[in-house]
């Protein structure tokens, strides 16, 4: 068990120790900076809604981060790191109060070279792309929250997104080149991790080191076109998605397939998604549009929307209707909806589960690469009734051979990983011996004690 | 049957009709411009060695091509198109004499945009890349003969190469955007083919139209590093190649694996390929080198050579030891060697065939993408004895489920395609009603008559 500071702890006195560092103690702001989008899950909602940090610090430099670390260790208070708080499973919600380290003031871009960059953790994904595209590069993958999300938060709590159809997931070797982390030892220090060693802190919810700098590979920035294609039949739409994923000659960045009635939740796209149709929301390289249209024809689809690369930043962004933004839009219409995160691996399994659950689990596919192959994954929308039924649905998926990255738990290992990552736990032993970082999230650590 | 012009035909008179167009009648030069690297095949050698065109024309413009077409139709003489003549199965060798149209004077680059280009057929692949890389682009794939080969020749008679690990083969939808072709009708005209229609002339050995302009997609030009990795065990080297092909986070352009004793034929690389070792010749994005080294470590390989992107154009190019340049180097040491072109699809099959044939068929793998998956293909070196034994070897491969693109035939359909492409035959009926273009190569046409 991780100790929660005594009720009597003098947080104002602590705040004064952060002299020179931006500190927030105003309760409304602290509350806002304690939470994320955990409320997508009716299971997490009651567990996390009252969780609050005691104060927020916003260091601007690695030296200030070291100062924060030193103070937290001295007083043995929990420290929870957050970026923009766009996660969905309480990754950055402090279970035991304490200090919240908001990284958004550390938003410097150290350099952008051919194929890679070195940035501070608080750099916003969309803002960075604007800079990088000037010299022909962009992030390899971004979440649908890319307008506000930070790179540090994405690495700490994300897994993949738009672009994963080309580069797989963040965890895949090569998608994170190096990190600098500040430790919470008696005398905090900076450690640089490179090569496979980055996996020690990659997707660890900030439980074992404060990332202060990241070296991340970049992708070539094509002129991207956003396209909506509609289909009469869902399975045909899914097959089209797979075929596009497998088409080596067609460059794409996003293949997002939505079974009816999901498109009806996309108010902003109503005119392009006629009722009853199933929709494919896509990002395609402009240079590939002509052969892409042949593929659409082959599958009997109809292109209803196309936004050119030049108009890329104008108006609606299709990407903001995909991945977990699909859930956001659907929940804005029907707040009882929740979702799952599923690796189907094959279209046969997609079809089976689509037929089995009907309207209760609405099929939303996102294609991505896993071990070199484009596979259907998804963030299906679930008509939530009870936690028991939700678990039944999850179990049925698993029995059918699908892999569920459960978004209804805030425990690191119970989400996508399923097993304790010994290396991450060992690294935590080294850099956070007092277990102060984001306590209660890493099962491998909690059970060890 | 295609008619061969009568012995008495007055070629000098014909030559004079090509007024204003560069024309070659000098026999040594005509002989040189009649042949390709067919001699890699001991089967083709006796069949093709005495084949000659009667004269060579080198038009510089589409208008001149129209003029050549008009004259050939008028006299009903065969017309065979060639680029640099770097093919290996006599694709451009005239079986029935006639006029050879050398495209190398049509080497204009119309434009290079983000992700695509429009060029004339005689543009040399390497020369183009030098231009395109200035603005961050390059060909998606090139053969190992890229220093001399032309884009028109590659499209007409090639199939894939360095870069196919990312984009598949030339035949894959999206790898050729448009072509303009001059017909051999009574009144020759220019036809533009776009979308899937390009397949009518793609890899048709110039049997159905003279390509005068091509629109081809481009790939982003990474800073590429050439690397040699050695292994004690061939199967480990092959598994490493597959793992690299499947590694979504590692950007590569070439994965070429050579079982011992093939590396002993690479005199120029001797110091990097110690005797007894199996070698991987690779091209990797510079930005991915660090995580790439972790993969090498995982498979117990040893990096013996690395040439940085800056030194890319200096000295030896590793690419020129791969694909069919492997055969070229081996044959320069042992002229009795020949080769096969094989799609193994799985490593299990590679291992089985490796064990079965031992030293008689030396394993040379090239990984490439087929329908979205990195698969092992290869251009194995064969210790040739008789044609009968060669066919036995081919048959055994096919019985084991491998696909052989037979390089010992000059017949279009008997090489890689195996079936008659009805669309290509029909297009020939339309644009070459007299069957003048590269006669004797397209079985679907010959058998139709």
Image: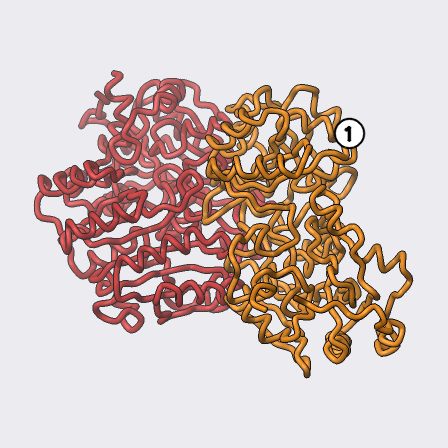
Chain colours: A orange, B red
Look at the picture and state if B42 lies above or below B313. Answer: above
Residue A142 in the image: x percent, y percent?
65, 50
Number of marks in the image? 1
Look at the picture and state if A364 lies above or below B361. Answer: above
Q: Which of B413 and A210 is in front in this view?
A: A210
Using the rendered image of the protein, determine whether residue B61 is visible from the camera's viewpoint.
no
Q: Which of A233 and B15 is in front in this view?
A: A233
Using the rendered image of the protein, determine whether residue B113 is visible from the camera's viewpoint.
yes
Give the residue at mark 1.
A267
Q: Nearer the viewer, residue B49 or A130?
A: A130
Residue sitting at x 22%, y 30%: B96
Residue A187 in the image: x percent, y percent?
68, 83
Look at the picture and state if A390 lies above or below B306. Answer: above
Residue count near mark 1 (Cα–Cα under 10 Å), binned few <14, some 14–19, many ≥20: few
Residue A126 in the image: x percent, y percent?
73, 52
**For the view shown, which residue lies furthest in the right direction?**
A26
Which image quarter holds the N terminus of chain B?
Answer: top left
Residue sitting at x 44%, y 66%: B294
Residue sitting at x 28%, y 44%: B344
Residue B185 in the image: x percent, y percent?
40, 20
Could you tell me which chain the residue with mark 1 belongs to?
A: A
Hey, which quadrant is residue B17 in on the image?
top left
């Amino acid at each position: 068990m991780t100790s929660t500071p005594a009720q009597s702890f003098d947080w104002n006195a602590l705040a004064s120790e952060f002299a020179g560092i931006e500190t927030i103690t105003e309760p409304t702001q602290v509350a806002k900076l304690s939470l994320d989008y955990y409320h997508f899950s009716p299971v997490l909602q009651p567990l996390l809604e009252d969780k609050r940090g005691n104060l927020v610090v916003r260091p601007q430099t690695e030296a200030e981060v070291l100062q924060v670390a030193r103070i937290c260790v001295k007083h043995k208070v929990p420290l929870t790191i957050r970026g923009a708080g766009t996660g969905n499973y309480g990754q950055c919600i402090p279970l035991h109060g304490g200090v919240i380290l908001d990284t958004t003031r550390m938003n410097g871009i150290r350099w952008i070279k051919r194929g890679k960059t070195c940035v501070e953790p608080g750099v916003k994904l969309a803002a960075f792309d604007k800079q990088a595209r000037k010299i022909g590069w962009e992030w390899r993958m971004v979440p649908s929250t890319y307008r506000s999300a930070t790179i540090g938060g994405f690495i700490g709590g994300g897994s993949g997104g738009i672009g994963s159809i080309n580069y797989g997931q963040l965890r895949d070797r090569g998608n994170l080149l190096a990190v600098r982390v500040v430790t919470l030892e008696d005398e905090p220090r900076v450690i640089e991790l490179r090569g496979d060693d980055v996996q020690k802190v990659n997707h660890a919810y900030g439980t074992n080191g404060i990332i202060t700098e990241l070296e991340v590979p970049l992708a070539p920035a094509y002129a991207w076109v956003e396209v909506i294609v509609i289909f009469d039949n869902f399975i045909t739409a899914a097959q089209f998605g797979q075929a596009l994923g497998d088409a080596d000659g067609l460059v794409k960045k996003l293949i997002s397939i939505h079974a009816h009635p999901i498109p009806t939740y996309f108010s902003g796209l109503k005119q392009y998604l006629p009722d009853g149709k199933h929709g494919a929301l896509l990002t395609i390289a402009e240079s590939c549009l002509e052969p892409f249209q042949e593929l659409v024809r082959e599958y009997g689809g109809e292109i209803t929307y196309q936004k050119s690369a030049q108009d890329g930043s104008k108006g609606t962004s299709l990407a903001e209707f995909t991945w977990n933004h699909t859930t956001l839009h659907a929940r804005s219409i029907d707040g009882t909806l929740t979702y799952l995160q599923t690796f189907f691996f094959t279209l046969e399994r997609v079809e089976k589960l689509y037929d089995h659950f009907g309207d209760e689990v609405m099929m939303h596919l996102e294609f991505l690469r896993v071990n070199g192959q484009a596979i259907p994954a998804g963030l299906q929308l679930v008509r939530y009734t009870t936690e028991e039924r939700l678990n039944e649905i999850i179990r049925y998926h698993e029995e059918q051979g699908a892999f569920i990255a459960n978004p209804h738990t805030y425990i690191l290992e119970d989400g996508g990983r399923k097993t304790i990552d010994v290396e991450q736990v060992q690294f935590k032993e080294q850099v956070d011996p007092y277990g102060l970082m984001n306590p209660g999230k890493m099962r491998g650590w909690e059970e060890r004690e």
